[in-house]
Amino acid sequence: MIGRLNHVAIAVPDLTAAARTYRDALGAEVGEPADLPGHGVRVVFVTLPNTKVELLEPLGDDSPVAAFLARNPAGGIHHLCYEVEDIRAARDRLLAAGARVLGDGEPRTGAHGRPVLFLHPKDFAGTLVELEEA
Ligand code: CO
């Protein structure tokens, strides 16, 4: 069911510093910061030949990334995003398999303007999983 790895998201305490590291030390193609208030994050996309890295910094007081950084002050991998062809069909299949879909279970518009859902890490080997309709 899942297709390509769309991105790896890394929560960071300092988005400017992390973007500089990816651009200057790793020589990656790094975009401009963008605020996503609906998701409580500020993001920078790093474009690689085969996937993307999404650097995340908390935006606002109730950002889900703030709690993650409280547990991981130096930052760390926050979630993986896999592409699916039909996000509602994917959700229904996962619910039937007993997986937990976060929030109200309805897809929201993600960082790339596409519908996304998040799946409970305890159901997926300890990793928060995002599905994005490709
Ligand atoms: Co993501």
Image (cartoon, rainbow, N blue to C red):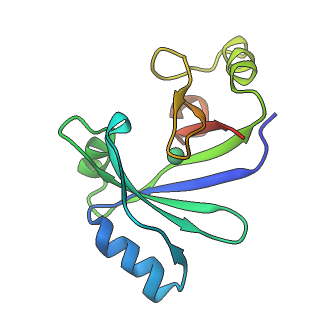
- Residue 63 picture location, percent across and down: 27, 39
Residue 93 vs residue 48, the one in the foreground? 48
Instruction: Work out which quarter of the rendered image holds the C terminus and state it.
Output: top right
As drawn, 98 above or below 127: above
Q: Nearer the viewer, residue 32 or 47?
A: 32
Quarter of the figure with the N terminus = top right
Residue 67: quarter of image: top left
Q: Is residue 90 left or right of 69 when viewed as pictured?
A: right
The residue positioned 79% from the left and 44% from the top of the image is: 3
Q: Is residue 100 above or below residue 34?
A: above
Residue situated furthest right in the rendering? 1
Q: Position of residue 89 (x, y in %)?
A: 75, 19
Q: Residue furthest top?
A: 96
Residue 7 locus on image (x, y percent): 60, 54
How many discs appear? 0
Tell me the residue at 73%/66% (across/down): 50
Could you say which quadrant of the image residue 8 lies in? bottom right
Q: Is residue 31 left or right of residue 51?
A: left
Residue shown at 30% from the left, 75% from the top: 17
Q: Position of residue 62 (x, y in %)?
A: 22, 34
| Residue that appears at 23% across and 49% down | 70
Is residue 17 positioned above or below 103 on the image?
below
